Amino acid sequence: MTRQFSLAHLTVLDCAPPEMTYLAARAGYDFVSFRPIYMGLPGEPNYALAENKQMLRETKKAMSETGMKLLDIELAKVYDGVEPKSYLPAMEVAAELGGRHVLSSIWTDDRNYAIERFAEICELAKPFGLTIELEFVPIASVHNLDGALDVLNTANQENAGLMIDVHHFHRSKDNVEDLDAVPRDWFRYLHLCDAPGEIPAWKPEMTRVLREERSLLGEGGIDVGSIVNRIPNIPYSIELPNAKLAQELGNEEFARRCLQSAKDYLNTHPLTKQEVK
């Protein structure tokens, strides 16, 4: 079975897109996943390629020289007061770089508003040939599989899909069997990582772990295989931030270890993949 892997930006967030592209190529990845929608989080670099033309040119050069492809960009958040059209420049850049998908998540408790804005983001993405992949996040408003499926079914957008993050799925306490009912063509890529099996009860601690202390595949407590086995053979985007390990090893060696641990895990845990129908 041929597997493809992308390096998610959160794994090496202090690397700008050009540097990240060269690094991912040397480490053996097939794709990169950029974070060009600036969210203004504490300590987070601004990689808004639509605004930084020099960085965009350098990113194009890096992708051309390495042959790396762009899998997805993030994050088109839905929150109270969001202006979906503000994501248009990033969508244009994604299309210009040959990207396929835009990751989204929902951070408003107003269900109707969330669905309307999500549908609007999907409509805006259509002319660029991009899909919008909804990710449920345990610290967000849409925090589990049922919530995500409710949005997707109600919005009813042909270019919308479901992006499963292994960490988030474990934290949501959803049942892997429920993934069987999800339309196969809603799965286009997934976030792969491991993490401590114990689920933090305190939201700040859950946030800390998901942003800076995930585990290499096979070194955490998540039954990753049981989740992956329910999903078709799609690209794996390795989103595995671990600040301590990245600092010890350096970003490139850390990215290489992330990829090798994923390959080792998948090779030693027999999976019966379901094909997209």
Image (cartoon, rainbow, N blue to C red):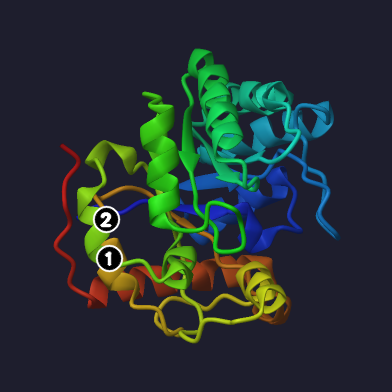
Please name whichever residue, 169 or 243, is drawn nearer the observer in this view of the structure.
169
- In this rendering, the count of numbered labels is 2
Measured as percent of width and height from the top left, residue 224 is found at: 34, 72
Q: Amino acid at mark 1?
A: Val
Asked if residue 193 is positioned above or below residue 159 in the image, the reply reads below
Please name whichever residue, 79 or 66, is drawn nearer the observer in this view of the structure.
79
Real-space Cα separation, disc 1 to disc 2, in angstroms: 6 Å
Neighbourhood count class around disc 1 (C-alpha, 10 Å): few under 14, some 14–19, many 20 upward: some
Q: Residue at point 74% right, 34% down? A: 58
* Residue 89 shown left or right of residue 154 in the figure: right
Name the residue carrying label 2: 179
Q: Residue at point 55% right, 46% down? A: 32
Asked if residue 106 is positioned above or below residue 92 in the image, the reply reads below
Q: Residue at point 51% right, 13% down? A: 127
Identify the disc placed on residue 128: none
Asked if residue 262 is positioned above or below residue 44 in the image, the reply reads below
Q: Amino acid at mark 2?
A: Leu
Query: In the structure shown, which secondary structural element does the residue marked by tag 2 occupy?
Result: helix
Whether pointer 1 and pointer 2 mark residues with C-beta atoms closer than 8 Å, the reply is yes
- Decide if residue 246 is in sight here: no
Measured as percent of width and height from the top left, residue 95 is found at: 56, 23
Query: In the structure shown, which secondary structural element does the residue marked by tag 1 occupy?
Result: helix
- Decide if residue 226 is in sight here: yes
Name the residue carrying label 1: 176
Measured as percent of width and height from the top left, residue 172 is found at: 45, 67
